[in-house]
Amino acid sequence: QRVLLLAEDRTAAVRLDEVRRDFVANVSHELKTPVGAIALLAETLEDAADEPDVVREFSRRLAQEARRLSALVQDIIDLSRVQDADALLDSRVVDVDAVVTEAVSRNEVEARARDIAIAAPGGSGLQVFGDEALLVTAVRNLVDNALRYSDGGTRVTVAARSGRDGLVEIAVIDQGIGIDADLLPRVFERFYRVDAARSRQTGGTGLGLAIVKHVAADHGGEVTVWSQPGRGSTFTLRLPSADSPTSDSAAA
Ligand code: ADP
């Protein structure tokens, strides 16, 4: 029995090591793209100093690549934090409507630019036990995706309600491009994208949903997705309510 256990531990350790190495390889690859572009654009700018149109265009692209780099670094920091078992060290009772309001307000500029209305009725009065900043990050990532993959859609809805088993549900509903059924389970993997070019063009890092998944798990909850290509997607975050007995174990 003991030998078997040790063998299993070893397999798990080897697998963990592989996952870690894969992640570092992926991160290096993802970082190289904007860093290389920034270097190239800066050199070109130097050569084109007396051509105002070129300077303007290349400065714009330089800023864009710098923003992408900064988003990637921020997501890597967020992800490494939520993968840590101590992520919820400073948990407290959190107002779900406040989380939704904050997440929506951080996406307002993007929504206006895309001509999409975000409906967030609020007033649920629900509470969860957890880390407010991480919960805002999770909902913000879902709303950000809903906007970025919303071709043709004019509305994104964020609804909080009391769901089954005493869980609090926060649903982010879009009318966007949707996701093929066979790809659905993969979207929560780090750096998995259905369409990499589109993700990058719209400022995606491929880490948003991996962060959401970990935030949900850290709170003793889960995130699920329903989607239909061409009709839209609904991502639902389910979290133990602050007054349900299970929330104590989630906080431990
Ligand atoms: P990204 O930065 O690429 O958006 P995410 O981890 O947030 O990374 O999402 C992974 C992939 O899942 C996206 O690249 C996209 O293909 C798909 N996806 C996520 N949210 C949606 C959505 N609301 N509608 C359609 N596709 C989505």
Image (cartoon, rainbow, N blue to C red):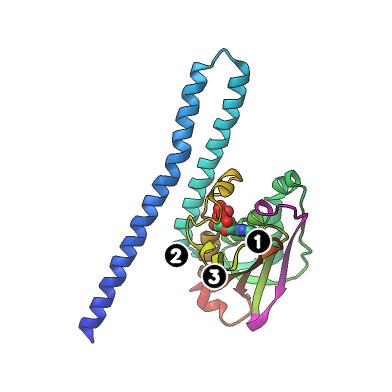
* Residue under the image location 62 percent in, 23 percent down: 56
Looking at the picture, tell me which residue is in the foreground, 30 or 160: 30
Mark 2 C-beta closer than 8 Å to ligand 1: no
Report which residue position mark 3 lands on.
Answer: 219
Residue 84 in the image, given as x and y percentages of width and height: 43, 62
Report which residue position mark 1 lands on.
Answer: 178
Q: Amino acid at mark 3?
A: His
How crowded is the residue under tag 2: few (<14 C-alpha within 10 Å), some, or many (20+)?
A: few
How crowded is the residue under tag 3: few (<14 C-alpha within 10 Å), some, or many (20+)?
A: many
Does 57 sit above or below residue 19? Answer: above
Foreground tag (1 vs 2): 1
Q: Quadrant of residue 153?
A: bottom right
Outermost left residue: 3
Q: Secondary structure at mark 2?
A: loop
Q: Which mark is residue 211?
A: none
Give the magenta part as a residue range. Answer: 147-166
Spatial separation of the CA atoms under disc 1 and disc 3: 27 Å
Q: Quadrant of residue 126?
A: bottom right
Q: Is residue 241 left or right of residue 190?
A: right
Going from the N terminus, do you reach mark 3 or mark 2 first? 2
Q: Quadrant of the N terminus?
A: bottom left
Residue 105 in the image, given as x and y percentages of width and height: 71, 52
Report which residue position mark 2 lands on.
Answer: 86
**Disc 1 vs disc 3: Cβ atoms closer than 8 Å?**
no
**Number of numbered discs on residues:** 3
Q: Amino acid at mark 1?
A: Gly
Q: Is residue 9 left or right of residue 220?
A: left
Spatial separation of the CA atoms under disc 3 and disc 2: 11 Å
Q: Secondary structure at mark 1?
A: loop
How crowded is the residue under tag 1: few (<14 C-alpha within 10 Å), some, or many (20+)?
A: many
Mark 1 C-beta closer than 8 Å to ligand 1: yes
Foreground tag (3 vs 2): 3
